[in-house]
Image: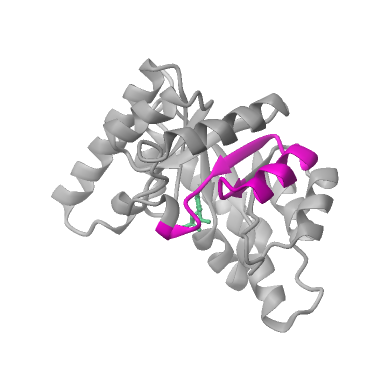
Amino acid sequence: MAHLCVNIDHIATLRQARRETEPDPVAAAGIVEQAGAEGVTVHLREDRRHIQDRDVDLLRKTVKTKLNLEMAATDEMVAIACRLRPDESTLVPEKREELTTEGGLDVAGHEEKIAAAVKRLKLAGITVSLFIAPDPAQVRAAAGVKADFVELHTGAYAHALQPAEVDRELGLLATAAMQAHSLGLRVNAGHGLTYANVGRVVRIPEVEDLNIGHNIIARAALVGLDRAVREMLAAMKKGTPKEV
Ligand code: PXP
């Protein structure tokens, strides 16, 4: 079954709303791991709107499963990652005017810059993932810049309303996952996934990790983080086809 990596940025967002010390994402990471998640994901944004440098320093020391650091492909962030050495680094389009397509990182349009960031991160021993739309040109470009993983953007699938549209978006994800795999890339997925829609993404055989934040933390605000994570793991398990 695909692994669950919980994005805990929203815990830091709540803390920053009052510039207080609580809730602490470091404590949240411990609860997430105890509940059975296989990884913790945080996005250190250039404007530090939620996760702070102190958080990533401490998380690097405390996370026992897998720490996935989401970041823009900037010199500052690459330097931080190379010092910190998260288990995985996911490059995301943060400076929208520079790097984005609507779906994800525009690797095809910025191959040189992204290839340089990938190279620096890999030399530091960090596994590198690129957050891209399920678009054949972006998958090819991700292989071209020698990323280890792509993280397929599931937002369009998650936001599709009509059944035919949902099927179409799921088909694009499945095709991109196959293409990535055939080019030697490993595959993660995430964005907009919920207890209700995660099952069909889990069934895409190439998908290794799912990065899920908002839906879990929203539920955690009402029922607690431990339960919210366990419920997501149960939803993923339910969505996985039975072994034959
Ligand atoms: N993957 C990436 C690359 C993201 O940037 C985010 C959002 O921070 C997620 C997954 C998780 O998305 P959501 O919060 O909608 O579950």
Q: Is residue 179 left or right of residue 119?
A: left
Q: Is residue 64 visible?
A: no
**Colour mode of the rendering:** one colour
Decide: is 116 above or below 234.
Answer: above
Q: Which residue is drawn at the image coordinates 54% and 68% (left, top)?
A: 218
- Per the rendered image, the range of residues in magenta is 70-97
Q: Residue furthest bottom?
A: 18
Q: Residue furthest left?
A: 164
* 40 inside magenta stretch: no
* Quadrant that contains the C terminus: top left
Q: Is residue 16 left or right of residue 55?
A: left
Quarter where residue 67 is shown: top right
Where in the figure is residue 128, as x and y percent of width and height? 58, 32
Where in the figure is residue 103, as x and y percent of width and height? 34, 50
Where in the figure is residue 11, as x and y percent of width and height? 67, 66
Q: Which residue is drawn at the image coordinates 69% and 25% (left, top)?
A: 123
Q: Which residue is drawn at the image coordinates 34% and 35% (left, top)?
A: 138
Q: Which residue is drawn at the image coordinates 43% and 24% (left, top)?
A: 143
Q: Is residue 96 visible?
A: yes
Q: Nearer the viewer, residue 141 or 17?
A: 141
Q: Nearer the viewer, residue 158 or 106?
A: 106
* 72 inside magenta stretch: yes
Where in the figure is residue 86, as x and y percent of width and height? 72, 39
Report the label total. 0
